[in-house]
């Protein structure tokens, strides 16, 4: 459903909303109808908490989401843990990041809506929050690709080194051909990868700034 406001924002930003609005309405109507029908007729009673009926059930879920949104762990898992090891690249090249989203406001809206909807119904302990952030990677890795091309590609060894850091950060103790021994090794691998990638980006940034100053 988040694609409905995002598609509206896209057509508005591209200046084609007045021309395409009839097609847009026609395209979103079936999705809205199915969404409402599913939400009205399919829901779960929470017998343990004495919750029965559609309105009490969704009110309970709304309360859980608000509580979850107020925890630091919820935001850490969504904004930090899910984006490792490239978490710091958008901040290192913050001007390019701002420019990227300024030219694609609909994409920024998409990213915000993914984060907000991911808070819905997730237990305060975190659950699979970072996995449910996967749709946001459409925006994140588009941004990372642009940063790589415009900010890093002119240093020949930078991109292969960052690619190696990405591979290191992908190693995990629960999956892979050669899984790591335990959770501690997974954490170590992703932290080292984040430090390596961030250090390379900082080096390239300051070297480029120094070259321009000369």
Image: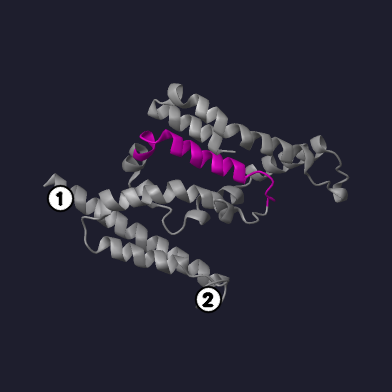
Residue 118 located within the stretch drawn in magenta: yes
Residue at 61% across, 32% down: 29
Q: In this view, does 106 lie above or below 188?
A: above
Q: In this view, does 189 lie to the left or right of 144?
A: right
Residue 138 located within the stretch drawn in magenta: no
Q: Where is residue 181 in the image (x, y as percent from the top left)?
A: 55, 78
Q: Is residue 20 above or below residue 180?
A: above
Q: In this view, does 158 lie above or below 14?
A: below
Q: Is residue 38 left or right of residue 73?
A: right
Residue at 63% across, 44% down: 119
Task: Name the quadrant containing residue 50.
Answer: top right
Q: Where is residue 145 in the image (x, y as percent from the top left)?
A: 34, 52
Is label 1 in a helix, a strand or a loop?
helix
Task: Name the quadrant containing residue 125.
Answer: bottom right
Q: Which residue lies furthest to the top in this view?
A: 18
- Give the position of the N terminus as an image quadrant: top right
Q: In this view, does 107 lie to the left or right of 30?
A: left
Can you identify the residue that label 1 sits on? 211
Q: Which residue lies furthest to the left in this view?
A: 214
Can you identify the residue that label 2 sits on? 179
């Amino acid at each position: 459903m988040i694609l409905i406001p995002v598609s509206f924002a896209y057509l508005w930003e591209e200046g084609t909303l007045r021309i395409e609005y009839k097609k847009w309405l026609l395209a979103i109507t079936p999705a809205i109808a199915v969404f409402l029908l599913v939400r009205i007729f399919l829901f779960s009673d929470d017998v343990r908490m004495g919750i029965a009926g559609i309105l009490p059930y969704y009110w309970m879920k709304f309360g859980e989401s608000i509580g979850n949104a107020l925890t630091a762990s919820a935001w850490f898992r969504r904004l930090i843990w899910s984006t490792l090891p490239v978490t710091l690249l958008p901040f290192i090249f913050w001007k390019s990041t701002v420019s990227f989203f300024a030219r694609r406001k609909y994409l920024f809206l998409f990213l915000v809506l993914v984060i907000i909807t991911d808070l819905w119904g997730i237990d305060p302990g975190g659950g699979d929050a970072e996995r449910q952030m996967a749709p946001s990677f459409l925006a994140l890795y588009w941004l990372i690709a642009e940063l790589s091309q415009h900010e890093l590609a002119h240093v020949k060894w930078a991109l292969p080194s960052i690619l190696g850091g990405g591979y290191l950060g992908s190693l995990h103790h629960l999956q892979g051909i050669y899984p790591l021994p335990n959770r501690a090794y997974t954490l170590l691998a992703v932290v080292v990868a984040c430090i390596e990638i961030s250090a390379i980006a900082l080096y390239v940034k300051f070297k480029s700034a120094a070259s321009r100053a000369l």
